[in-house]
Amino acid sequence: MHKPLALVLGATSALALLSTTAYAAGPEAGHVHMLVLDAEQQPVVGATLRGACRSDDGAFFGGKKLETPWTCTTDAQGLCSAELRLLPKPGSDRANACKALAPTEITEAGAAPAKSSYFTFFADGQAQSYNLLQKGASWKHGDYFFQSLESKAAFDDLVGRNTSDFYQRRVAIKDESAAPTLSLDTAAAHVPQSREYPNTEFLRVLIDRKTHQASVEIVVTDTYIDYAMHMLNEARYGAGASEKTVALSIGKQGSTCNMRDLFERKCTYQETVSFPVDMDAFRQAAAAYRPGKITLWRFQVRAKSGHERMRSLSHAEFHAMAQAMDEALAKLR
């Protein structure tokens, strides 16, 4: 074959391959994954969810529409999944969003059907949609609060909060020989549920290399929009005679103000703080862990501005950290 002709044919083939790749259609099917919890964050078992949604390619004339009914029933973890047909976006690897045609129906075992809100799935065009449905009155979502989660990691984080194994696999150990302390933390177990408001809380243990004394603290990140920074300064935990109020140690403080924020005199603020938890309270929280149950250790953070935040950590997390701490101490001895 002549060299010029071979080059032309090769270029044509490459262009055809590029075109096929660039204009591949999006997925024709996807899955909705639901985690259903009650008001106490316990799994709702045996609840049947029913709904229907419509995909629309947005064309004014001659456009395509696809209506898809779906249903699923929750398992022992409060989980259920349903497969839905999707309307692919031409020239994209994404699908069109599927918007509800009617309020989603939730039927708990032995109860009458309840109506929730009009859910939208696959808003980002991905073929997997991860969602939280929690019982508790909501002005927008009826008797159930609905939240679309940004990633599988955020979904798995919610699902795994009632197991010690989930946290044990995510305990990070920072063991630098030059450092006076060895540290362990569960930060990897807490994926922010929102990019705009990445609020998290996790456990951290510090072990003195010389004395082998361990101390426990909770690290909290609070992100919010307001006229001024709240200035978090104290935490409270426990109840009755065992209630304790402790000062917060300030980690990071920052703010972001765009032009609109400045006109409204509001900015986005973020504060990262920590506070100590005494060892008796830590051990009691670890001992309160019950496999298969979502039980929470609650605490409150307060600010000089008067603002208060109620936050919580799972007893499963305390249980996992206690085991990791004891193993680390055993190795140091």
Image: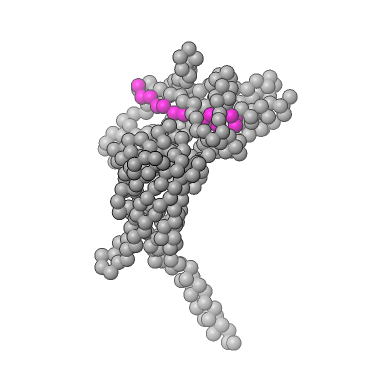
**For the view shown, which residue lies furthest in the right direction?**
333
**For the view shown, which residue lies furthest in the top direction?**
241
**Which quadrant of the figure has residue 205?**
top right
* Residue 250 visible in the shown view: no
* Residue 50 visible in the shown view: yes
- Residues 126 and 285: in front is 285
Name the residue: 47% across, 20% down: 237
Residue 155 drawn at (x, y percent): 48, 44
317 falls in the magenta region: yes
**Which quadrant of the figure has residue 133?**
top left
Quarter of the image containing the C terminus? top right
Residue 230 drawn at (x, y percent): 37, 26
Residue 234 drawn at (x, y percent): 44, 20
**For the view shown, which residue lies furthest in the front direction?**
110
Up/down of 97 relative to 34, above or below: below
Up/down of 174 relative to 116, above or below: above
- Magenta-tinted stretch: 306-321
Name the residue: 59% across, 87% down: 1
130 falls in the magenta region: no
Name the residue: 56% across, 21% down: 284
- Residues 276 and 111: in front is 111
Residue 135 drawn at (x, y percent): 38, 37
Name the residue: 50% across, 41% down: 77
- Residues 155 and 255: in front is 155
